[in-house]
Image: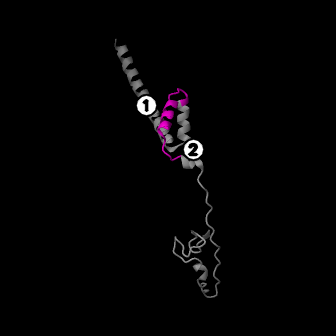
Amino acid sequence: MSFCENCGATMSEDAKFCLSCGTAAGAAAQQPAAPQAQGYAAAAQPAYTPPAYTPPSYAQLQSTEPLSVGGYIAMFFLLCIPVANFVLLFVWSFGGSVNQNKKNYARATLLLMVIAIVLSIVFGGVLTGLLSSMIRGY
């Protein structure tokens, strides 16, 4: 593997032109040097070094795959366990290497639980107030 001297793209050893910019292989070395302007020496530019490639981790590759039907069924059965369901929802919602579908489902479920708790407190207070006013009336 070699790199294009013009744009830095990777090229095969037997390539005659760069596939990215179209520059002939070795053409940058064949170009004449730039003339010096009024006594100032042209600044030497460092050779191009391509950025280091870091392959994505297994967790990053797997996190965007769709959940299978069996995965959903197992998730629903695990959420039927009384105390473990809250723990699992928090782990799935805020875990780093959790499947994105499972993470979104857990966040939506937690949000709906919070909404249901707030509404039940509000309606419970209203119902308690109505019942207490009715009892005082008799």
99 versus 40 height, above or below: above
Q: Which residue is mark 1?
A: 116
Q: Residues within 10 Å of mark 1 (few under 14, many from 20)?
A: few
Q: Amino acid at mark 1?
A: Ala
Rounded to the nearest angstrom, the CA distance separating label 2 from label 1 is: 28 Å
Residue 133 percent coordinates (x, y): 36, 18
Q: Is residue 126 left or right of residue 38?
A: left
Q: Residue at coordinates 62% horizontally, 68% vertically from top-left?
A: 1
Number of labelled discs? 2
Query: Between disc 2 and disc 1, whose residue precedes?
Result: 2
Q: Secondary structure at mark 2?
A: loop
Residue 101 vs 22, above or below: the answer is above
Q: Residue 66: within the magenta?
A: yes
Q: Residue furthest top?
A: 138
Residue 97 at x, y percent in the picture = 57, 44
Residue 59 higher or lower than 134, as above or below: below
Percent x, y of residue 101: 48, 42
Looking at the rendered structure, the secondary structure element under dot 1 is helix
Q: Is residue 111 left or right of residue 88?
A: left
Can you tell which mark lies on residue 97? Answer: 2
Residue furthest toward the bottom?
Answer: 38
Report the front residue among 78 and 82. Answer: 78
Q: Position of residue 62 (x, y in %)?
A: 54, 47
Residue at image x 61%, y 66%?
A: 50
Query: What is the span of residues highlighted in magenta in the rendered image?
Result: 63-84
Indicate the amino acid at tag 2. Answer: Ser
